[in-house]
Structure formats: C-alpha cells, structure tokens
Image: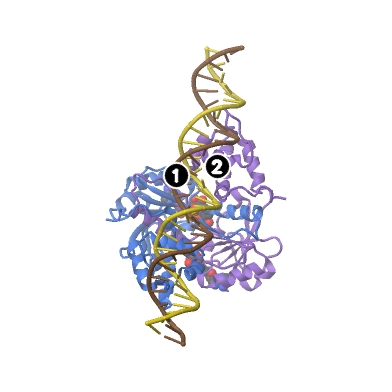
Chain colours: A purple, B blue, C yellow, D brown
Amino acid sequence: MHIEQQKIPQATAKRLPLYYRFLNNLYNQGKMRVSSKELSEAVKVDSATIRRDFSYFGALGKKGYGYNVEYLLSFFRKTLDQDETTKVALIGVGNLGTAFLHYNFMKNNNTKIQFAFDTNEGKIGTEVGGVPVAHIDDLEEKIGEDISVAILTVPSSAAQGIADRLVKAGVSGILNFTPARITVPDHVRVHHIDLAVELQALVYFLKHYPLDVEENIESDEED
Amino acid sequence: MHIEQQKIPQATAKRLPLYYRFLNNLYNQGKMRVSSKELSEAVKVDSATIRRDFSYFGALGKKGYGYNVEYLLSFFRKTLDQDETTKVALIGVGNLGTAFLHYNFMKNNNTKIQFAFDTNEGKIGTEVGGVPVAHIDDLEEKIGEDISVAILTVPSSAAQGIADRLVKAGVSGILNFTPARITVPDHVRVHHIDLAVELQALVYFLKHYPLDVEENIESDEED
DNA sequence: GTGAGATTGTGAAAAACTTAACGACTTAGT
DNA sequence: ACTAAGTCGTTAAGTTTTTCACAATCTCAC
Ligand SMILES: NC(=O)c1ccc[n+]([C@@H]2O[C@H](COP(=O)([O-])OP(=O)(O)OC[C@H]3O[C@@H](n4cnc5c(N)ncnc54)[C@H](O)[C@@H]3O)[C@@H](O)[C@H]2O)c1
Ligand SMILES: NC(=O)c1ccc[n+]([C@@H]2O[C@H](COP(=O)([O-])OP(=O)(O)OC[C@H]3O[C@@H](n4cnc5c(N)ncnc54)[C@H](O)[C@@H]3O)[C@@H](O)[C@H]2O)c1
C-alpha cells in the first residue's frame, strides 16, 4: 500500500522529517505560503535541492507563487504517516535512555515510547517520563505486534545480544546509540547514531579543513 | 601544519573516528594484523571503501598480509590528533546535557568537557559528572583560548542566541542537538544531530522501503 | 625455495547526490 | 490588458561517493 514510488533517493527521505517540522512551525506562525528560497534559509538546504526533493512527489507548488503551507503540510503528514502513532520501545534506562524518556517525541513526531526495559532492579516497576520500565526478561512478552521500532541505549557489550532478541521479537528498525556495530538480518534496518564519533569527526574537520572555504555539513546523519 | 592533504573526501573523514575505535578494540584484544575484509565486517563498511579510505593516506598495508594493527592505530592516532586532549564546553545541563556530562569521552576520544553552562540557579555551582556548571553569563570569560568546540543542548528557542555568543567567544565548531537550524559565519562549522528527525526517518524507511532488499544505512550519519 | 592463496592499492565504471540554469507559468501592480 | 518580478519543475551538468575488478605483491606451508 505504500511501497509504490520506490525511487525516492535516500538522501531525500532523510530530509523529509526536517521539512515537515519546519512546515509545522510555519503553519503555527500562521504563514500561508512559502517559497523554496525561504524554506532553504530556514532548514539550510539548497533551494534547488528542496524543489528537487518535493518534485519526487509530483507538482506540489505553483510557479510564481511557491507552496501553500497548509497543503504541503497535510501532504507530508500523510507521506510520513503522521496520522497513526508509531510505538517504540527503549532498551537501557541509563543516562541517555533516561534523557530520551523525558523527551516528548509526540509533539512533532507522533511517536511514543511505549515501554522501557532494563536489568537494574531499582528501576524496574518505576515510571520514567511517564513510561513504565519493565525487566528485560519481559521483552518478548511486552513487545507485541504493534512495536516494530526500538531505541538501543544499553552498554555496548550488551548491544548485540539485545538486538538479536529484538529481531526475534519482531522489531524491524533499531536506532542504535551504542558504539557497537550490530549484525542483523537483511530485513531489519539499523541506524547508528554514534555520538563519540560525531564529536571526533567535528574536531577533525576543524583541524584539517580550511575554515573559510568549507560550508557546513549535515550530520547523519544523520542529523 | 595539518592543512596539507586537502583532498580527503568528507565521507572518508567522517569514518576515520570509527576506524580508530575499532582498531583500538583490536589492539586491546591483542590482534596483530587485520584485513580490510575483517574490518569491513566489524564496522559494516564495504571493504573496498575501507581500502580506498586508507589509500588517501598512502600505502598503509601490505599486499597479501593486510594491515598491522599497531602501526595503523598509531598512524590514526596522529592523524586524529589524539595525542592532545580536545577541550569542549557544553551549554544546557538538561536531560540530554546531563547524560553527556556523565559520559566519559576521554576513554576513546581524548575529548574532555571542561565547562558546562546553564541558566538554572539550582544547577550553577554544582558539578555534574565531574564537570563544573557555571552561569551562562560567565560564558565568554570561561571559554578562553583553548576551547573551540561546544555541545549545544539548550531549548531550541535559545539556540541561535547562544550560538551567536559562542561564535563571538571564539568557538569554531558546534555540535547542535536542538531542532533549530542555526546560522553562523562561514568560518564556523555546525553539525546537527537531530534525534527526532533520525527517529522519524527510520520509521519512514521501514514503511516505504522494501525491507529484504535494502541494506543498512549509516546515520549521519551520519551515522 | 617454490607456488598456491591472500590481500592490497587503484583505475575505471557506476551510482548517488547536488547544483546551475532556464522555460513556463503565476502573481500583482498599473 | 499588459508587464515586471517571482517561483516552480526539470533537464542537464557537475560533484562526490561507492563499488567493481584485477595486476601487483606478499605470505606461509611445505
Ligand atoms: N551517555 C552518553 O553521552 C553517551 C555518549 C556516547 C555513547 N553512548 C553510548 O550509549 C549507550 C548508553 O550510554 P549510557 O551513558 O546511557 O549508559 P548507562 O550505563 O548509563 O546506561 C545503560 C543502561 O542499560 C542497562 N542495561 C545494562 N545491561 C542491560 C541489558 N542486558 N538489558 C537491558 N538493560 C541493560 C543498565 O542497567 C543501564 O541502566 C552506551 O553504549 C554508551 O557507550 C552514551
Ligand atoms: N531529550 C531528548 O531526548 C531530546 C530529543 C530530541 C531533541 N532534543 C533537543 O535537545 C535540546 C535539549 O533537550 P533536553 O531534553 O535536554 O532539554 P531540557 O529542557 O531538559 O534542558 C535544557 C537545559 O538548558 C537550560 N537553558 C535554558 N535556556 C538556557 C540558556 N539561555 N543558556 C543556558 N542554558 C539554558 C535549561 O535550564 C535546561 O537545563 C532541546 O533543544 C531539545 O529539543 C532533546
């Protein structure tokens, strides 16, 4: 049902959530229309790239006018499946995990962390940021049909083992914050966010690239 | 002194810290040699890409043998300036900032968060993760000559204002975790790590890309 | 020593992504 | 109604990154 236009470049797909958020901002500010140039300044993406990105979805704008904010927003809401809440599990309620649990991803993302898991008995049974923390042994049981994405914030030594269990439990997307590069079957997607690497890469760029010439770089990034 | 080989692709530069960490792991495990194929399996980067990346620095390996772990490690240590500690400031001791302060970036990165800043009187004067928290008003004073990188974990509404002050204070690299896309002069580099976007992008990929065919993606990227 | 097997470094091709440029169309002011 | 200014969608060019594929070279077991 949504595997129809297989040709949207990955680079474009990664920018969609960014566009979506800024369109939301504009909408909340009461703006009716926006041009690729304005949007470009806000999101720091070349305006030609924005027009190109949008064009993969058809002709969303009007020549000489720009884009209708409300229309564009509702289009992206559908495209990004923002009408249904995405339910997520978080494994590892430590420093990083706790920070995420306190953050409200619902606000812009319609994403909700449904369960958290840990091994630490002191944390089990409590709620952190309104999310109940369960024992890791209950992982398979609690991750029912409706959770297909997990955030992994355990120590790196535990990462592969937990990933294996997540996959067995039916998870097909993992956002991995551990430094471990985990191995998963082909049908599972892993995005690594490696904070230490990001920091070190930034430092490297500063020391080795002529500063006045280079432009900024988008992180993964990977954002 | 280090602006000599200007031709190293950015994509390569971003992978260097990753290689460095895995080489460290191998070294600590007592491994003497490693091939691009082995390394490839560990870091999930195509072996040809690894060889190409390394080749920008000259012939680091030996045909038929592979790479000497110790030599490669010491080469990258120099290349990544791991002999001198990089001092960093963190602005915004909230959920995310606190998590970072508790993390030891020294272990693999030789990077140290020297000062943290906040507006919350309750936090000022305390130490979090061994890092003293100062008032944001003292930013310019405390960021002396030796801090040129900052981690930004304030509310997005404060991001641009703080960024302006950081730049004035002499910071030339900012790791921005806020959803705000900040504007800085050309000589300053900003890497955005946008966690909400990363999560939403992962969800989008799961729903719209045929799972059995696609391979994993590095975040920033950026992973 | 020798030769089978391993592995690099790289030229060349392919793929992915970005940017420039402009014709076509829209708007809005007169 | 006409025109100047604005903006899209897209073609084509440019850039960057990845991947293939293989000659050159090294290793190591015998
Ligand atoms: N905190 C940071 O700023 C930071 C920066 C870079 C990378 N990381 C990485 O992120 C990950 C988490 O970091 P952190 O600082 O939150 O670590 P942490 O030690 O504070 O948290 C880890 C949590 O996972 C739990 N845990 C351990 N084993 C588990 C298991 N088998 N199943 C379920 N839970 C388990 C622990 O009880 C703990 O609560 C680590 O891999 C770390 O390397 C963190
Ligand atoms: N926590 C998450 O998981 C998460 C996820 C995605 C994005 N973010 C973004 O990261 C940023 C930080 O998130 P958080 O959850 O840590 O927020 P937070 O509200 O917990 O922390 C913000 C901190 O900044 C301080 N602060 C406010 N104004 C300041 C100023 N002018 N100068 C210095 N300090 C100031 C506050 O006192 C607070 O301690 C936010 O922009 C948020 O949108 C966080």
The amino acid beneath tag 1 is Ile
Residue of label 2:
A22
Residue B23 shows in the view: yes
Residue of label 1:
B182
Q: Which chain carries label 1?
A: B
Q: What element carries label 1?
A: loop
Q: Nearer the viewer, residue B2 or B105?
A: B2
Residues beneath discs 1 and 2 located on the same chain: no
The quadrant the N terminus of chain B occupies is: bottom left
User: Horizontal and vertical percent for residue B126?
Assistant: 39, 61
The amino acid beneath tag 2 is Phe
How packed mark 1 is, by other alpha carbons closer than 10 Å (few <14, some 14-19, many 20 or more), is many
User: Horizontal and vertical percent for residue B175?
Assistant: 43, 53
Q: In this view, does A146 lie above or below C30?
A: below
The residue lying at 30 percent from left, 51 percent from top is: B141
Residue A24 shows in the view: no
Q: Nearer the viewer, residue B219 or B176?
A: B219
Q: Which of B214 and A50 is in front in this view?
A: B214
Q: In this view, does A71 lie above or below B57?
A: above
The residue lying at 48 percent from left, 46 percent from top is: B180
How packed mark 2 is, by other alpha carbons closer than 10 Å (few <14, some 14-19, many 20 or more), is some
D24 sits left or right of B47 in the view:
left
User: Horizontal and vertical percent for residue A145?
Assistant: 71, 62
Q: What element carries label 2?
A: helix
User: Horizontal and vertical percent for residue D23?
Assistant: 43, 64
Q: Which of D30 and B21 is in front in this view?
A: D30
Mark seen at residue A146: none
